[in-house]
Image (tube, grey):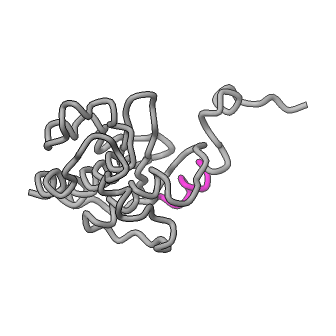
Amino acid sequence: MRTIKRRRKENKTDYKKRRNMLKGKIPRVVFRKTNKYLIAQYIASIEAQDHIKIGTNSKQLLKHGWPKEGENSLKSTPASYLLGILIGKEIQKRKLDVPIIDFGLQRVLKKTKMHAFIKGLIDSGLAIKIKKGFFPNEDRLQGKHMKIKINIEDIKSNILK
């Protein structure tokens, strides 16, 4: 009988998927959700050891003009879109390779925060191929569904400076 690895039992690592990503030798952008924030990291794997080149989270959006009263909404769809723009700009600034996207064991559904993150990467200038029907509609990306009024265009222009 085969023993299941500890990280697989804890639902943290899909070893088959990881092995296939490492074989490609392409860097990846990892997108994770916590209870309060969104985390994005640009990771290059060298000899099966991960090296984080860029790491950021949605808390950094407060520095770029996210309203202080909206601090509890740093896990929203507009926050994930802006986080994608933030890390995409940093990837271009450092002239790193175009990465693949790694969502880990998160369930990938259409029009979710994950696809808003990818839309942010694309809007920052990275050449990532994905079908247009997967993205959330523009009203959700702009935050018009939220109680707190957030001016996404101002925050986006602050990030892209």
Query: What residue is at 44 percent from the left and 46 percent from the top?
Result: 30
Q: From the image, which quarter does the C terminus lie in?
A: bottom left
Query: What residue is at 55 percent from the left and 45 percent from the top?
Result: 104
Count of marks overlaid on the render: 0
Query: What residue is at 36 percent from the left and 43 percent from the top?
Result: 41
Q: Nearer the viewer, residue 49 or 5?
A: 5
Query: What residue is at 61 percent from the left and 55 percent from the top?
Result: 20
- Residue 15, by quadrant, is top right
Residue 130 shown in magenta: no
Residue 65 at what x, y percent from top left? 14, 42
Residue 72 at what x, y percent from top left? 32, 30
Q: From the image, which quarter does the N terminus lie in?
A: top right
Query: For the magenta stretch, what is the residue range?
Result: 18-25
Q: Nearer the viewer, residue 108 or 125?
A: 108
- Residue 121, by quadrant, is bottom left
Q: Nearer the viewer, residue 3 or 69?
A: 69
Overall secondary structure of the magenta stretch? helix
Residue 124 at what x, y percent from top left? 25, 63
Q: Is residue 146 above or below residue 73?
A: below
